[in-house]
Image (cartoon, rainbow, N blue to C red):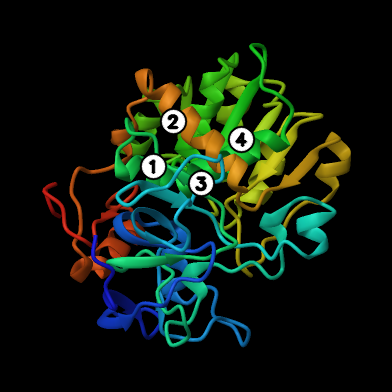
Amino acid sequence: MTIPATTDAALLTGYGRDLERATLPLPTLEPGSVLVEVDTTTVCGSDVHTWQGAFASPDAAELPLVLGHEIVGRVVATAEPDARDSLGRPLGVGDRLVWEHAACGQCRSCTVQRQPTLCPNRRIGMFHPARVAPHVVGGFARHTYVWPGAGRLRVPDPLTGEAASAASCALRTAVAAFERLPAVTHDDVVLVQGSGPLGLFATALAAWHRPARLVVVGGPQERLEVARAWGATDTVSVLEHPDPAERLDIVRDLVPDGPGTVLEMSGAPGAFAEGLQLAGRGAHYAVVGTLGSATTEVRAGLVAGKGLSVHGVLGGDIGTYARALTFMERAADVVDWQQMFSGATYPLERATDALRAARTGAEIKPVIRPSGSSAPTA
């Protein structure tokens, strides 16, 4: 492949506004870096929140930004002739790649706690100002730059670009959540709050362990149908039952003692407070979907009164990425991952439409192909 000097990108220049097309320079590769041509970018809820200004603050990244952090790219060039991925496998031109945010490797979170996802200096491509080199580190562009400190993995050949792209954020985060919880066994009851990408991936992971009951609380109905197809034994619609007290009664009818494992994967206002109510005594509760600065009123006494263990989960490291891809490949015979995608794709010039489709819930996981594809377009 020819190494280009510039690339096309869709820029966030103002919160809530349509993205603007722009030509941006591509940097000279530093040792350990990789330049990729973006094959697939899937839209994450964090992309939508950033577009809408939910993370805007005096400390927020300077606009314009290139959004997108769920990315599969094909290697265009590497900085070393013997480049390898984080599992030691050779990387060559044309190989498909997923990668993580770049932690600093020198702070307490990175070295002592060994939790690079908590690194206060972590570089996240979609928050990097496009005016500053390396300019393009997000997925809403034809090419993007992989920082030297970012772990990276070759994508297994059987996986589609959209499946691997979604796995690089939503699935690896769900994997990280389960790794913080006690192992799910055959007599456990698991409850998942949310039927978006995080909730559906959590459903598939929980179902893999065949718990006694697997309840998903979410909506709309089409997503709950996917949840059932991926292993949920029971679903509760938040649209048909908008009152949390009514949902609590339904869950108590299904599981009188309450679930022993609860995963908050929705990020909806009030979800955390409701999860504390839904959880059974002695339950473990993973809080994953709730981010940002919104506040919610909770009954803190439920944590002590029920003896709950609450686990906050923020993404996953490169090892979690690897396990997510392995799970996706192994489970492909029993889980139709393509049910998460509509079958349509968006070209780069319609990236704003993809954001709208995610925001309105018209699609579970919109797919952008910045470099073009023979797949049907939206």
Mark 2 / mark 1, whichever is N-terminal: 1
| Residue at the disc numbered 1 | 164
Q: Amino acid at mark 2?
A: Met
Q: Is residue 21 left or right of residue 209?
A: left
Mark 1 / mark 4, whichever is N-terminal: 1
Q: Residues within 10 Å of mark 1 (few under 14, many from 20)?
A: many
| Residue at the disc numbered 4 | 248
Mark 1 / mark 3, whichever is N-terminal: 3
Q: Is residue 103 visible?
A: yes
Contact, CB < 8 Å: mark 2 with mark 1? Answer: yes
Q: Nearer the viewer, mark 1 or mark 3?
A: 3
How far is mark 4 from mark 3, CA to CA? 46 Å
| Residue under the image location 43 percent in, 88 percent down | 131
How far is mark 1 from mark 3, CA to CA? 16 Å
Q: Nearer the viewer, mark 3 or mark 2?
A: 3
Where does residue 11 sit, x and y in percent of width and height? 33, 79
| Residue under the image location 29 percent in, 74 percent down | 9
Q: Is residue 246 visible?
A: no
| Residue at the disc numbered 3 | 85
Q: Is residue 190 above or below residue 213?
A: below
